[in-house]
Amino acid sequence: MELAVRRDTDQLYFNGASFSSATAVWLPATGTSAWSFSVSALPLVAGAHTVSARALDRVGNVSASGLSWTFTFDGTGEVTRLTFQHEPDALRLVVPSAADAH
């Protein structure tokens, strides 16, 4: 699984260090049957962001099309993780609330 994160206000993609790429930069998620991606390095600012995901198999084949989710970061709390849950025919983005931080 690979992810690309775009800051929607200026359409720039996260390249692993900053939002400075005009084209998608695909970053690896960790895991085999459940995937995770640390957001601690993401310099999120208030506003909308789009996360796109695509499948990648062991020999390097990439899925023809991926899924995308848009979320709005309000900048008032600390985000510790974003979770994608598998549902029939879709993945769901779960953003923890302040109550989840305990």
Image: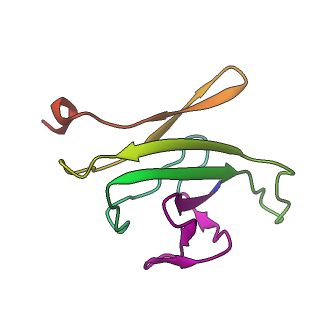
Residue name at image x 54 percent, y 60 percent: 5
Q: Compared with residue 6, is residue 52 higher up or lower down, i.e. above or below?
A: above
- Indicate the quadrant where residue 89 lies: top right
Q: Is residue 40 magenta?
A: no
Q: Compared with residue 87, is residue 74 higher up or lower down, i.e. above or below?
A: below
Q: Compared with residue 60, is residue 15 higher up or lower down, i.e. above or below?
A: below
Residue name at image x 43 percent, y 79 percent: 17
- Indicate the quadrant where residue 102 lies: top left
Q: Is residue 21 left or right of residue 66?
A: left
Tally of numbered tags: 0
Residue name at image x 35 percent, y 69 percent: 41
State the residue in front, 52 or 46.
46
Quarter that holds the N terminus:
bottom right
State the residue in front, 61 or 76.
76
Residue name at image x 18 percent, y 35 percent: 98
Q: Position of residue 91 (x, y in %)?
A: 61, 32
Magenta-tinted stretch: 3-29
Q: Position of residue 93 (x, y in %)?
A: 50, 36
Q: Position of residue 13 (x, y in %)?
A: 56, 69
Q: Is residue 60 left or right of residue 49?
A: right
Q: Is residue 11 magenta?
A: yes
